[in-house]
Amino acid sequence: MKIFLIGFMGSGKTHWGKLLSAKLQLPFRDLDTLIVEKEQKSIADVFSEKGEEYFRYQEKQTLEELINEEESFVLSCGGGTPCFFNNIELMKKSGKVLWLNTSIDVLKQRLMKERMSRPLIRDVSEEELRRYIIRKLTERKMYYEQADAMVNEESITLEELIRSLLQNE
């Protein structure tokens, strides 16, 4: 079984991915971590040295390699992963895609604490961050909505998360 967790940065994909992985006894993978290992640089450095276009291509390549090389896993995708190339179609064809939907206020609160480690929002002020989240969510929603299931990340339990994945079997 291949499970792809999608959602905005800060939506809990890594947190829930690790819990799902342990509960379902599947390997946990984080797409950004795989890219860091491949590039031998942080995501922030890849962005600043080579740009977003290069990063998105590496993201696509790494996603395809993982799908082709591993039988099953729980994958925490980057917030933009489903929005580029044919990534959302590839994920849906290869396994189950789950959108972790999180409110704007919770995203803002979480992201303020992690701003320096996130290249897309590193230089965004607190006031600008809310507008940035709204703008990006609006752009990405049409991709996120293609997921096999959507859960409200702030109020879900692990059992409900698993149930929502299995409902669409």
Image: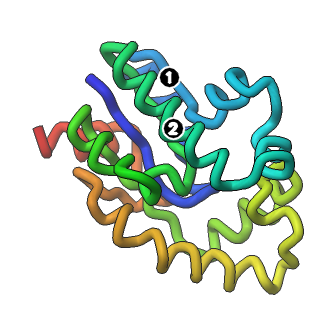
- Judge the density around disc 1: few (<14), some (14-19), many (≥20) Cα neighbours within 10 Å: some
The quarter of the displayed image where residue 112 is located: bottom right
- Judge the density around disc 2: few (<14), some (14-19), many (≥20) Cα neighbours within 10 Å: many
Relative to 61, does residue 83 appear above or below in the rendering?
below
Residue at screen point 85% across, 43% down: 45
Q: Position of residue 116 (x, y in %)?
A: 88, 55
Q: List the residue tagged with mark 2.
A: 76
The quarter of the displayed image where residue 136 is located: bottom right
> Horizontally, is 67 left or right of 134 in the view?
left
Can residue 25 be seen?
no
> Horizontally, is 92 left or right of 81 in the view?
left
Question: Disc 1 or 2, which lies upstream in sequence?
Answer: 1
> Horizontally, is 74 left or right of 13 in the view?
left
Quarter holding the N terminus is top left
Nearest the camera: 133 or 54? 54
Rounded to the nearest angstrom, the CA distance separating label 1 from label 2 is 8 Å
Relative to 132, does residue 81 appear above or below in the rendering?
above
Q: Position of residue 13 (x, y in %)?
A: 53, 44
Quarter holding the C terminus is top left
Can residue 28 be seen?
yes
- State yes or no: discs 1 and 2 in contact (Cβ < 8 Å): yes
Q: List the residue tagged with mark 1.
A: 28
* Amino acid at dot 2: Ser
Q: Position of residue 84 (x, y in %)?
A: 46, 56
Mark seen at residue 86: none
* Amino acid at dot 1: Phe
The quarter of the displayed image where residue 162 is located: top left
Residue at screen point 44% across, 23% down: 65
